[in-house]
Image (tube, rainbow, N blue to C red):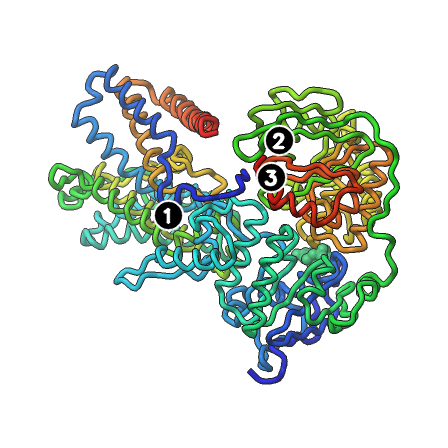
Amino acid sequence: MRREPNVSRVPVSVRRVPGTFYILIIMISLASITIPGFGTVSNLLNILLQGSFLAIVACGATLAIISSGIDLSVGTVLSLSGVVTGLALHAGIPIALAILSGVLTGLICGIITGSLVAFVGLEPFIATFGMMSMAQGLGLVLSNGASIPGFQESFRWFGEGVVWKVPVPLIIALVIVACIWWLLRHTRLGLYIYAIGGSEEVAGWSGIEVGRCKLALYSISGCLAGIAGVLLAARMNSGHPTVGVGWEMDAIASVVIGGTPLTGGRGGVIGTMVGVAIVSVLRNILNMLRLSSPWQITLIGAIVVIAIGLDILLRRWRLALEG
Amino acid sequence: MGDGPLLKMVGITKEFPGVKALKGVDFELRAGEVHVLVGENGAGKSTLMKILSGVYRPDSGRILINGKEVQITSPRKAQESGIATIYQEFNLIPYLSIVQNIFLGRELMTNTAIPRMNYREMRVKAKELLDSLGIQISPDTLVKDLSMAQRQMIEVAKALSLEARILIMDEPTSALTSREIEHLFDIVRALKASGMGIIYISHRLEEIERIGDRVTVLRDGEVIGTKDVSGLSTEELITMMVGREIGDLFPRERVSKGEVALKVEHLSRRNVVKDVSLEVHYGEIVGLAGLVGSGRTELARLIFGADRFDHGEIVISGRRVKGDHNPSASVRSGLSFLPEDRKEQGLCLSLSVANNVILASLRRLFPHRITSPRREMNVTLDYVRKLRIAIPSPFRAVKSLSGGNQQKVVLAKWLCTQSKVFIFDEPTRGIDVAAKAEIHGLMNELAEQGAAILMISSELPEILGMSDRIYVMHEGRIVKEFTRDEATQEEILRYAMGGVGGAA
Ligand SMILES: Nc1ncnc2c1ncn2[C@@H]1O[C@H](COP(=O)(O)OP(=O)(O)OP(=O)(O)O)[C@@H](O)[C@H]1O
Ligand SMILES: [Mg+2]
C-alpha cells in the first residue's frame, strides 16, 4: 500500500483492461472451437444485438455502483416503460411521442428513486428495491398482466432495423456507452460520482452538492432503463410486463465482473462492457448447447463467481510478478 | 483591508448530543498573523474550525469577515468567503489522483463548445503547486499510493490552490517529520507575509514560538485567554491549557533488560525495506527514527504480517515466523501493532468506544467465546480513566470523538491485549501535552512489567526521551544504532538524512 519515494506511476488515463477481459477471450476461443456455429458472423452479430439491451441498462448500474450505491429497479423499470410504450402505440399516439413516453417513464422512476436517495436519505438499496416492486406492480396493472403485442413496422425498426448491416439497437447502445464513458471521464458530474463513491463526507466537505449528483445519476439510470425498455419492445414486437425480470442482476453482475467493486469509488464503463460481453456470450453458449433454463441460471451464477475469483487471483499474481 | 481584524467570531456555541463542545467562544484573526489555537483533546478546537469552514452550523453566535457578518452555511460558502481548511482527519479521496483531489469541487473546464475537464491545465497548475511545496511526485499518482506525510502535503497543496484569505490548519504537522515541517513553516511564513491570516492548531508546543504570533487557549469549550507568543513561557501555556501542573514529560526509570523478544534478520521487501536486522529485548523501549518515507512503517507492517516479506527472518517471542504470517496470527502470538493511520487501520469508526477497546482482546477477555457486557464495560472504563479519554459514554461511536481522543482509544485497544511485544507507530500523534506525559508513563510502566516496545516516532524529543536504544532508518536500511547516551537530536538527523555514508 505504501511505496514511498514515488517518482512516476501509470497515469490514471492508462488504466489496465480488467483481468476478466482475458476470461472473455478464452471463453470465445473455446466456444468457437468446440461449438459448431458459434463463430459464425451471424451468431456473433446476434450476441452483440442481444448484449445491446443489457449494455444500456448496465451503464446506469455502473454509475450507481461507482457512487457506492446500487440500482435494483432497472429490470422492472425496463418492463414498465415497454408496457407504457405499447399502450401508447395501441392508443394511436404518434411513434415519436410513444417512444418519448416510454423513455420519460424510466426517467420519472429514476427521478423518484434519486430524490428518495438524495433528499430523504434512504439507502439506495431500499429506495431502488421499493421502486423495483412498484414498477413491476404498475406494469402488471397497466397491462392486465398480459403482453401488448403487434406494433407498426416503423416502430419495430428501432428493434430490428439495420444501418449498413449494423443493428439499430447496437448503434444506440454504442452511442450511449460512449456518452457515459465521456460523462465519467470528462465531466464534473462523472468525477463527483467517483468522489462520492470514494468518500461521501470528503466530497461534501469539498463543496460538492452530493444530493444533486445522486439525483442526477439515478435519473440517468432510470432513463437508460426506459430507453432499453422501448428498444426491447420494438425488438420483440410486444410490451411485456415481466420481460425485465432478473435484468438488474445481470446488470450488476456485468458491472462487478467488469472490475467496478460494489464498494464504489473506482471502475468504469469499459470494464462493464467486458462484463456485458461475458454474460451475453455465456447466455448464447448455453442456448446453443440447449441447456434448460434452470441450468442456465445455475451456470451463470457459477461463472460470475469464477470470473471474479480468477480476476482476484490474476491480480495477486501480477503483483507478485511486479515485485 | 481596514485596520479591523480579518475575522471575528463572537459568542459561538455548539452542542452535540450530550456534549457542550463550545460555550460562547470569541475568536479573532488579523491579516498577516499566525494565530495558534491550543487546548486539551476534546477542548473544541476542531469543532470551532469546522464551524468556520461550513461543516457544522453553530447553535448561536456570529461570524464577521472584514467587519461584515457572513453566513457560512456550507463548505462551498466557506470557500467562496475565502476560507481554506486543512482538516485534522484526512480529506482526500484515495482512488482519485492528486490532480483530481486538489481541484475537487473547483475543476477547471475547457472553453470549448462542449466544456470538459481541462486536465492539462489542472496538471500544470498542480505541478507548479507541488514544486513550490518541494514535492517530487507525479500529479497523476493516486492518493492511495501516498504515505501519510505525502498525503498531508497534498492537503496543504489543496488548501493553497484555493488562494484563500484565511487558512485553517488543524494539526498539519502531526504526520510530518522535521524536514517537511521546516518546509511547511517556510511556506506559512511566506503566506503570512502576503497578508493571509492563518489559524494554526497543534499539540507540539515548541511549534508555537517558532511560527505563532498570538495564541488562544481553549479549555472545555471556553476561551481561557489570548496572549502574544513572545514572552509567554511553556509552563504558563500548559497551566492555561490543563489548569494544573503536569509531571515530568519523559519520566525515566529503567530496569535491566531481559531476553530477546523480537528479532528481525536480513528482512527485505522489494525496495522499501532492505536487509534490516534489529532486536528488541523484554523490558526495553527501542526507538525507530527516520524521515518520512524511510521505510519505518513498512518495516513495522512486515513484522506484524500486514505485508509479505521477500527475504529474511522474524522471530517473535522465540517463535520463528512462518510463511503464513498474518496480523491475526501475530495478535495471537502476543504481538500488538498500533498503526499510524487510526482512521483506516486503527479503529472501526462506527462502533462504540467499548467495542473498539476490546476488539483485539476478545480471546483474552472472553475465553469461552461468550461476551459479557459487564466485563466489556469495566475493562473499557478502566482505560477511559487511565488514558483520560473524554467521552460522555462508552457507548458513543468512536467517530464522534475528537481526534486526540480517538488516538487514545486506539492505544487503549492495544494496551488491552496485554501483549508482551508492542510496535507503536506514532503513538502520541495528535495527543495533548498532559495526556502525552501520561501515555509515556504508561509505556514506561509496560516496559517495567517486562514488555518489549518498538516505537516509531517522528518527534525526536519523544524518541530521545523514551528510548533505551535508537535505530535510524534511511531509504529502507538501518544506517545507525545509538545507545541512549550517545544519541543527540543532531546526530540522529544527520543519519536520517543519509548524511553519513547513507547508502552503505
Ligand atoms: N460529530 C460529533 N458528534 C458528537 N460529538 C462530537 C462531534 N464532534 C465533536 N464532538 C465532541 O465535541 C468535543 C470537542 O471536540 P473537538 O473535535 O472540537 O476537539 P479538539 O479540541 O479538536 O480535540 P483534539 O485535540 O483531540 O483534536 C468533544 O467532546 C467531542 O467528543
Ligand atoms: Mg481536533
Return the x and y of residue A306 as percentages of the image width and height. 43, 24
| Residue nearer the viewer, A134 or B417 | B417
Disc 1/disc 2 C-alpha distance (Å): 44 Å
Q: Are marks 3 and 1 in contact (CB under 8 Å)?
A: no
Q: Compared with residue B126, is residue B284 higher up or lower down, i.e. above or below?
A: above
Return the x and y of residue B200 as percentages of the image width and height. 65, 64
Q: Which residue is depicted at the point 71% across and 26% down?
A: B263
Q: Amino acid at mark 1?
A: Ser
Judging by the rendered image, the residue that carries numbered circle 2 is: B302
Same-chain check, marks 2 and 3:
yes
Q: Amino acid at mark 3?
A: Gly
| Residue nearer the viewer, B201 or B182 | B182
Q: Residue furthest left?
A: A164
The numbered disc on residue A221 is 1
Judging by the rendered image, the residue that carries numbered circle 3 is: B501
| Residue nearer the viewer, A47 or B12 | B12
Return the x and y of residue A303 as percentages of the image width and height. 40, 24
